[in-house]
Amino acid sequence: MIPTWHKIIFGNCIDMHEIPDNSIHLMVSSPPYYNAPFDYPDLFKNYDEFLKLIRDLAKELYRVLAPGRIAAFVTDDMLVKGEKYPVVSDITKIMVESGFSYRDRIVWEKPEGYIRISRRSGVVLQHPYPMYFYPDNIQESIIIFQKGKFDYSYIKTLDPKILEASKIDLKKYSSEKWYLTIWRITNVLPFEDRLEKGIAAFPEEIPRRLIKLFTFVGETVLDPFLGSGTTTKAAKDLERNSVGYEIDLDLKDVILKKINYNQTTLTSGSANKIEIVERPDARRLRTFLQEKVKNQRSVVKKNTTKLVSATTATAGTSA
């Protein structure tokens, strides 16, 4: 196992002055879902404020990303208060305008089994006529961008041991169909005792795949919206270095628990060095957001009860 280092910075990712130019080999992250009712209700004043965050981040990403390397966003269009926002296309436009090339889009398909008819798709049950259809979403986009072209002669300069350790498992690549533009991966399920409770975390399999596909052992991975620390954990497990930014200081304990941080990480005998930085621009958001989510769920529960009652009544009449 090669020694790796990991830096977790609590602060706003639009300022990543701790990172030298051209030093990051992969960015993988999931930005806050724009004002998502059950994750980030009213976090942004409006959609323009959200897009400004992405623009500011894109400028910093172009500075810190090494030439030829990859930035991957896990995101999707958002439905907020009845209005659909084209998040995927807008992030794509911003990244291209910032100098990146648009390399690929992968659809992350979540399992259908746990999905129940929602208020949105359930409208047809109340009104089985044209124009009432709104589908439930079981997918997100992984949009992939590249800073210029990768110089493949770089591979010849790598230590043969590093190159061998970085080889992609072709059995997994084939059996799990990594080669397709659709990845079927189970999301973080809403179990009561999960570490990520109240956090819009993506499954570890997503950063793991991206890290294996786009970096070599010993290189550095960045997550500017670290959340519960999933990307740092994946990088650490795969012998890559990492830098993570998280503005919400309330997530510190969750992140440290996920990456198994303790005093042994500070000793000279540890293979992994972990540094924690708390900047003045960090905020405390989780308690505030969870209270808003709680109120939102109460409203939805009442409305869903009304929908079920109305649907049952309609079914009874039809019978």
Image (cartoon, rainbow, N blue to C red):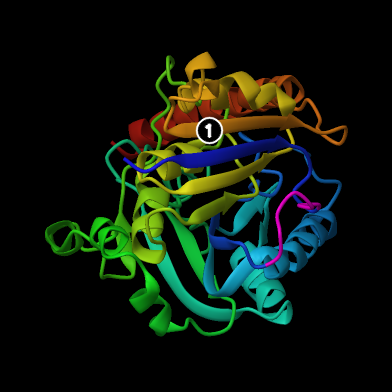
- The verdict on residue 16 being magenta is yes
- The verdict on residue 262 being magenta is no
Up-down relation of residue 138 to residue 187 (above or below): below
Up-down relation of residue 232 to residue 82 (above or below): above
Tally the numbered discs: 1
Nearer-the-camera pick, 300 or 258: 258
Side of 42 where 38 appears, left or right: left
Instruction: Report the magenta residues as a range.
Output: 15-21
Nearer-the-camera pick, 270 or 62: 270
Please state, as top left, top right, bottom left or bottom right, where the C terminus lies in the image.
top left
What secondary structure is marked by label 1?
A: strand
The local crowd at label 1, few if under 14, some if 14 to 19, many if 20 or more residues have their Cα within 10 Å, is some
Up-down relation of residue 269 to residue 1 (above or below): above
Up-down relation of residue 240 to residue 279 (above or below): below
Residue 180 lies, in percent from the top left, at: 27, 70
Residue depicted at x 68% and y 63%: 64
Residue 92 lies, in percent from the top left, at: 62, 73
In terms of secondary structure, what is the magenta stretch mainly? loop
Side of 267 where 234 appears, left or right: left
Answer with the quarter of the image where residue 314 lies: top left
Residue 227 visible in the current orientation:
yes
Residue depicted at x 70% and y 54%: 19
Residue 186 lies, in percent from the top left, at: 32, 42
Residue at the limit of the structure toward the front, as seen here: 268
Side of 1 where 236 appears, left or right: right
Answer with the quarter of the image where residue 139 lies: bottom left
Amino acid type assigned to the residue bearing label 1 in the image: Lys
Please state, as top left, top right, bottom left or bottom right, where the N terminus lies in the image.
top left
Residue 294 lies, in percent from the top left, at: 65, 20
Q: Which residue is mark 1?
A: 273
